[in-house]
Image (spheres, grey):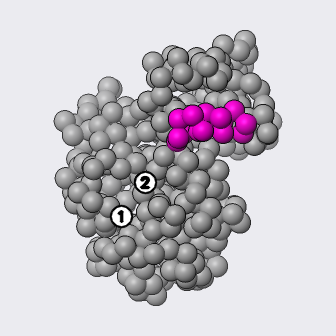
Amino acid sequence: MLVNADFHIHSCFSMASSKDMLIENIASKSKLKGLQLLGTGDGLHPKWLNIVRESTEYMGDGIYSCDGMHFVLTTEVEAKHRIHHVIIMPDIDIASELSDKLPSKNKSIDGRPKTNLDGGELLDLAHDYDCLIGPAHAFTPWTGMYKFYDSIYDCYDAKPDFVELGLSADTDMADRVSELKDFVFLSNSDAHSPWPHRLGREFNQIELEDISYSSIKKAFKNKDVKANYGLVPNLGKYHMTACTKCHKLIDPCVSRENKMKCSCGGTIKKGVDFRISEIADLNEPIHPSFRPDYIHLMPLAEIISSVHDKGVTTKFVQGIWQKLIDNFRTEINVLINADLNDIEKIDVDIASAIESFRNGTVDIIPGGGGQYGQILFEKEVKKPKLVTLDNF
């Protein structure tokens, strides 16, 4: 069975997360999105585990259900060198044991615990408990594995179970790094709020024998991820090298010569695009035979917002979003499968924008320095210039 899955989200107990990140809210919004399987996020936090117990029905083999949405226990851990890792766990009992074993001073406070273990030690601990583990948003400049290490094996010593790409990378970028050719790639949302423009903004279509932890583990081993869906990498807020204060896009050579300080006084952050160019040993991506398509999309409410120049959460945008959901059942169906002629009957401009994603003709102002990129569609917007030695 083909399942739409998002394995990396957070709960109300994570820093910068919405207080509305509760199981019932997550379940109802994810159904509207078109997902069938979600990670719980924050699965080492004792209070969150209690909420999962109280809010779900245990279906067996690691799966918990609420309002027709299936959950598997997951967590994100910040380990040595501020590297983030995603762990998928067999059930609540094992999550509780793993939480007890993890050396961490804040695991009862923050949903994303910090530990002094390095990647190899964390991998060993996870595998001792039959968990799956891999780097979270592997290329991002703040907490991604490749921000510190030049090789995944320098981080883990042994082979992790998957690599999460993050919002600023896709398979074309990652498959320029030949050491990743044998890894399953995941595209997850890292959502901190239950809005459908956050949940499932990146997701995986995975072939499972049934919805169970055993099937998830087997699917990863057999490389049965059949499609990755996610943002165009240019839209990621760390895609290009840019200033974190004024968000100017700055040539990496200029950044280095100025010791990562912008002329405005802000700090320049190395972009995912440049970091991959540093570690890549291939000029062009070479995709292994099992590598599925990476299909670019954008949350529906953000498309509506961009086209009509209205806020994502305004009544105007949410009204059009709801009308589309009422007609086509789920957001994923609108973005991927719905007939464009039928979408035109509701909003011609939205149909045109969705078509531009489907045929790969979107025009983007790249993101960087912590600011997401912008979709132009047919608007006449002056694109920012890259700061070089001549105009720094």
Q: In this rendering, would 29 be left or right of 225?
A: right
User: Does the magenta segment cover residue 327?
Assistant: yes
Q: Nearer the viewer, residue 49 or 347?
A: 347
Residue for point 59% across, 81% down: 47
Say whether disc 2 or disc 1 marks the residue closer to the N-terminus: 2
Name the kind of residue labelled 1 in the image. Answer: Ile
Question: Which disc, if any, is residue 21?
Answer: none
Determine which residue is flagged by label 2.
36
Name the kind of residue labelled 2 in the image. Answer: Gln
Residue 166 image position (x, y, % from top left): 48, 46
Q: CA distance from mark 2 to mark 1?
A: 21 Å
- Disc 1 crowd rating (10 Å Cα; few below 14, some 14-19, many 20+) is many
Span shown in magenta: 318-331
Q: In the picture, residue 389 is in which quadrant? A: top right
Residue 7 image position (x, y, % from top left): 44, 57
Q: In the picture, residue 21 is in which quadrant? A: bottom right
Q: Main secondary structure of the magenta part?
A: helix
Residue 112 appears in the picture as rendered: no
Residue 224 image position (x, y, % from top left): 24, 48
Q: Nearer the viewer, residue 268 or 379?
A: 379
Residue for point 69% across, 63% down: 20
Residue for point 19% across, 53% down: 222
Q: Are marks 2 and 1 in contact (CB under 8 Å)?
A: no
Helix, strand or loop for disc 1: strand
Quadrant holding the C terminus: top right
User: Does the magenta segment cover residue 155?
Assistant: no
Determine which residue is flagged by label 1.
133
